[in-house]
Amino acid sequence: MDRKLTSCSVAKRGSLQRHSGRMQHDSDEKLTRNPKTISPLVVGRVVGDVLDPFVSSISLRVSFNNKEVINSGELKPSQIVSLPRVDVGGDDLRTLYSMVMVDPDAPSPSDPNMREYLHWLVTNIPATTGASFGQEIVSYESPRPTSGIHRIVFVLFRQPCRQTIPAPGWRQNFITRDFAEVYNLGSPVAAIYFNCQRQGGSGGRRILP
């Protein structure tokens, strides 16, 4: 990924390579507003494989052809061919957000050597609107898993200001954590994911102990 300066000052540049000594967090970290509830993002190991623990602070709704995505739900490849509708909450149009859509299980959950595969990247999305009002940096590519059950993750970040973010050179091995660090985005403000497997596949995702 090109490290050009954004239109606002970036306080700290991070490496786009994962630091081998990154601290791991407990998998039972509570992420929702209800302290008695463990987030599906923890159960599904989105927290850990893609994100560090965070507290959701804004609404994020994603739907494909009027079928709303729910955490840990399942959609078939035929249901997600078209560009999804993404609605962002908030109350101030001057607040802008960046959204990434990634697959941490590419090409196969048993050998995710392309983790994370970037399916979509949109920046400068005004609060109270949706992805269609933002700037598409990487065009939508519909997931088409061929092996195993893949988690497809949407992550929303609040931007410090309007930013110019160049497209990465490739989709594979995108790292959401490092993307946020490089562009001074801080922790996510919302995230949601669904499971997807090849069209004829069946069965649920197995969570390893």
Image (cartoon, grey):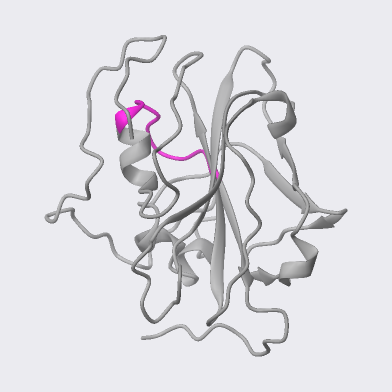
Rendered-image quadrant of the N terminus: top left
In this view, the residue farthest toward the left is 21
Q: How many marks?
A: 0
Is residue 17 among what the camera can see? yes
In this view, the residue farthest toward the right is 66
Q: Magenta span: helix, strand or loop, mainly?
A: loop
- Which one is in front, 208 or 3? 3
- Give the residue displayed 54% in from the left and 67% down from the top: 151
Rendered-image quadrant of the C terminus: bottom left
Instruction: Give coordinates of residue 128: x percent, y percent.
Output: 73, 26
Asked whether, in this view, residue 73 is left or right of residue 192, the answer is: right
Instruction: Give coordinates of residue 28: x percent, y percent.
Output: 38, 67
Instruction: Give coordinates of residue 50: x percent, y percent.
Output: 40, 56
Which image quadrant is residue 14 in? Answer: top left
Q: Is residue 7 above or below residue 38?
A: above
Q: Is residue 39 above or below residue 102?
A: below
Q: Is residue 163 above or below residue 105?
A: above
Asked whether, in this view, residue 53 is left or right of residue 207, the answer is: left
Instruction: Give coordinates of residue 112: x percent, y percent.
Output: 38, 71
- Which one is in front, 70 or 20? 20
Magenta highlight on residue 38:
no
Magenta stretch in the rendered image: 182-190
Which image quadrant is residue 166 in? Answer: top left
Is residue 37 among what the camera can see? no
- Give the residue displayed 31% in from the left and 41% down from the top: 178
- Give the residue displayed 68% in from the left and 15% down from the top: 93
Which image quadrant is residue 2 in? Answer: top left
